[in-house]
Amino acid sequence: MKGKERKAAIAAYKERKVEAGIYAVRCSVTGQVWVGSAPDLSTIQNRLWFTLRHGSNTHRTLQQAWTIHGSDAFTFDIVERLEDDDPGYVRNVALKKRQERWQDQLQAMRI
């Protein structure tokens, strides 16, 4: 990639709209569900799958299920997107409350 193209790609990445929200990871074999929140939904699945593939995910039950059943047994779903208008602190509080609600609703474990 040439210098101008690289700079343009970096600028476009920085200007992209970031969506915060709640996501669920499901194991089709066991029926287990894990719920998490992320300030940037566009990057969280790649981060999770990377740590799971390398055996370094800090959530033991999720890592154990992944190791036993393999990646094909797992799905990733965005269950709620938050409005982007809120400042950082307000957004973080909203994410926490919404995550708790989804944990209860889906009878899920917290990520």
Image (spheres, rainbow, N blue to C red):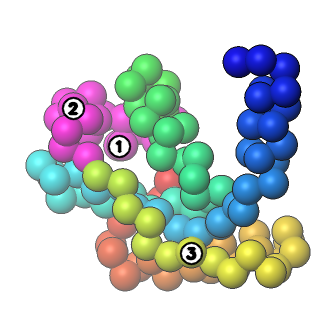
Closer to the camera: disc 3 or disc 2? Answer: 3
Q: In the rendered image, which quarter contains the N terminus?
A: top right
Q: Amino acid at mark 1?
A: Thr
**Residue 106 is at least partly visible in this image:** yes
Q: Amino acid at mark 3?
A: Arg
Instruction: State the residue at coordinates (74%, 76%).
Output: 84
In the rendered image, which quarter is residue 108 located in? Answer: bottom left
Is 75 on the left-hand or right-hand side of 88? Answer: left
| Residue neighbourhood size for the residue with mark 1, other residues' Cα within 10 Å, grouped as few (<14), some (14–19), many (≥20) | some
Which residue position holds label 3?
81
Q: CA distance from mark 3 to mark 2?
A: 28 Å
**84 shown above or below 77:** below
Instruction: State the residue at coordinates (33%, 73%).
Output: 107
Dot 1 falls on a residue whose secondary structure is: helix
Which residue position holds label 1?
61
Q: Tell me which numbered mark, 3 or 2, is placed earlier along the sequence.
A: 2
Instruction: State the residue at coordinates (83%, 43%).
Output: 11
Dot 3 falls on a residue whose secondary structure is: strand
Helix, strand or loop: magenta stretch: helix
Instruction: State the residue at coordinates (33%, 75%).
Output: 106
Taking the magenta stretch, the answer to whether it contains residue 67 is yes
| Residue neighbourhood size for the residue with mark 2, other residues' Cα within 10 Å, grouped as few (<14), some (14–19), many (≥20) | some
Dot 2 falls on a residue whose secondary structure is: loop
Q: CA distance from mark 2 to mark 1?
A: 13 Å
Q: Which mark is residue 70?
A: 2
In this view, which residue lies farthest toward the left? 29
| Residue neighbourhood size for the residue with mark 3, other residues' Cα within 10 Å, grouped as few (<14), some (14–19), many (≥20) | some
Residue 63 place in picture, x, y as percent = 37, 35
Residue 51 place in picture, x, y as percent = 48, 30
Q: CA distance from mark 3 to mark 1?
A: 25 Å
**Residue 100 is at least partly visible in this image:** no
Q: Which residues are magenta?
A: 58-74
